[in-house]
Image: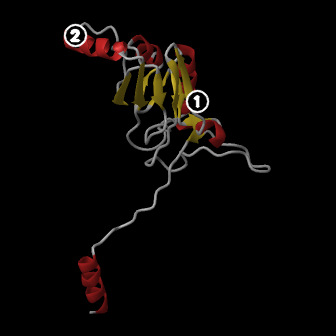
Amino acid sequence: FSLVTLGDLLYSHPVANSPDAEFQRVVELIKRGDVTVGNQEGVFIDLKSFKGEGYGNGLLWGEGTLARDMRAMGIGMVSVANNHSTDWGPQGLLDTRRNLDEAGVVHSGGGRTLEEARQAGILRTPKGHVALVSAASTFKPNAGANDAVGEVPSRPGISVLRTRKVNLVTVSQMAMIRALATQ
């Protein structure tokens, strides 16, 4: 079983059929994997029919056909949880998920509810099942999905991972900090 992992898939227009020979060599390496996983950085939507709106600075956008382009390159799984997942609001994320579903690209990390955003994406291959769980530790305000609570409806978004910074110091550094604090 071979797993190919890619970093951020950060492009706006289809490239699978690029005439660039060196790029096609990379595509062939991607296709050789039993499973290829990447991080879908941003959304891909059809701006002509899109019903939502952009939110914040640095809006990443890709054509609505990018899910099919990824599939053509052999990418089978993507995370949709990252700092650009909600650049085009909840609707951009939901449109991207729909495009991925239609192209047959398994995804995780975003959804109509928090429960859905935290579900694993499962890819079934002839050699076994592969699960992908995704969360983001950097994200725009209000990017996190929420489940419905009482009369409050659910909110689409991503699975966010909140972290707490811990500073570790040596004994001698702590002594210096104490000395500085008392002066």
Q: How many marks?
A: 2
Q: Which mark is residue 131?
A: none
Mark closer to the observer (2, 1): 2
Q: 124 left or right of 174?
A: right
Q: 33 left or right of 79?
A: left
Q: Which mark is residue 94?
A: 1
**Which amino acid lies under the numbered mark 2 shown in the image of this protein?**
Asp
The quarter holding residue 28 reads: top left
Q: Which residue is mark 2?
A: 20
Circles 2 and 1 in contact, beta carbons < 8 Å: no
Asked if residue 76 can be seen in this view, the reply is yes
User: Which residue appears at 43% of the width and 30% of the height?
Assistant: 40
**Which amino acid lies under the numbered mark 1 shown in the image of this protein?**
Leu
Specify the farthest residue to the right: 151
Picture coordinates of residue 94 (x, y %)? Answer: 58, 30
- Relative depth, front residue between 127 and 119: 127
Picture coordinates of residue 5 (x, y %)? Answer: 36, 28
Asked if residue 49 can be seen in this view, the reply is no
**What element does badge 1 sit on?**
helix
* Label 2: how many Cα within 10 Å (few below 14, some 14–19, many 20+): few
User: Which residue appears at 41% of the width and 31% of the height?
Assistant: 39
User: Which residue appears at 45% of the width and 40% of the height?
Assistant: 82
Q: Which quarter of the figure is the C terminus placed in?
A: bottom left
The quarter holding residue 63 reads: top left
Specify the farthest residue to the left: 22
User: Which residue appears at 54% of the width and 38% of the height?
Assistant: 89
Picture coordinates of residue 31 (x, y %)? Answer: 36, 13
Gap in Å between the C-alphas at discs 2 and 1? 32 Å
* Label 1: how many Cα within 10 Å (few below 14, some 14–19, many 20+): many
Picture coordinates of residue 158 (x, y %)? Answer: 54, 40
**What element does badge 2 sit on?**
loop
